[in-house]
Image (cartoon, grey):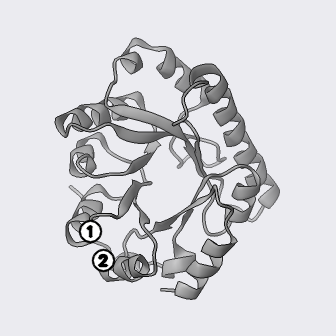
Amino acid sequence: MNIEKYNEIKSSLPDHVQLIAVSKFKPATDIQMLYDEGNRAFGENKAQEMKAKHEVLPKDIQWHFIGHLQTNKVKYIAPFVTLIHSIDSEALLQEVDKQAAKNDRVIPCLIQFHIAKEDTKFGFSLGECETMLQGEVFQNLHHVKICGVMGMATFTENMDQVRREFQKLHSIFNTLKEKYFPNNPDFKEISMGMTDDYPIAIEEGSTMIRIGSAIFGPRDYSQMLSPEI
């Protein structure tokens, strides 16, 4: 845990940029330490791990789900999740709407776009997203709120490529805002940028950066919780 680095990053951010501390695979004690420092927004990528941490940590924590979310895992986080960054299919959005209704909630969501050169990344293309937004299924979802977009750049040392990918996501955001959410003040978030590239992301319009290893240190994946069933 590097509290000094956390404070350094936090103090450098523009007022409109929120820091999401990515706490996946880290113990609740580490999260509590950063909570005591004043941080409230934490990012997780395993539903059951997030649920377990939510049960033992302060209830004013803002839990951000940032990983690939399987439809059968939505039920674990629906009662409390603050924002789902990674809506990458219409089926997932439908399930979030279903589970939100069961919990008498409207769950804020970001639409994830595939902007990287890597096939392993998830996300919509702009065309796929527009088809969904124009469709009848989307019009009948009443327990989700679309608040913006998310994307992950290619894992590369080529920062020019990373910048182009962030510019692409910002362009997608602008297109969606103009065509589908022109009068919706909730549609305002661009979640992009991690430990190695967040300064570029901020320059290209990010409103949320997801920082893990710079704050919590490298992860020991051998110590992670048991794989989810």
Mark 2 neighbour class, 10 Å CA radius: few under 14, some 14 to 19, many 20 or more: some
Residue 53's image quarter?
A: bottom left
Is 48 on the left-hand or right-hand side of 159?
left
Residue 123, relative to residue 131: is it above or below? below
Cα distance, mark 1 to mark 2? 6 Å
Q: Which residue occupies the foreground of this view, 120 or 200?
A: 200
Residue 228's image quarter?
A: bottom left
Q: Where does residue 169 sit, x and y in percent of width and height?
A: 67, 41
The residue that label 2 is drawn on is: 28
Q: Which residue: 51% across, 37% down?
A: 186
Q: Hey, which residue is sitting farthest right in the picture?
A: 160
Sequence order check, earlier mark of 1 and 2? 2
Does dot 1 land on a helix, a strand or a loop?
A: helix
The C terminus - image quarter: bottom left
Q: Where does residue 34 sit, x and y in percent of width and height?
A: 43, 79
Residue 189, relative to residue 201: is it above or below? above
The residue that label 1 is drawn on is: 53
Q: Where does residue 175 sit, x and y in percent of width and height?
A: 68, 27
Residue 227, relative to residue 31: is it above or below? above
The kind of residue on which mark 2 rests is Ala
Residue 84, relative to residue 221: is it above or below? above
**Res. 212 mark:** none
Can see residue 132?
yes
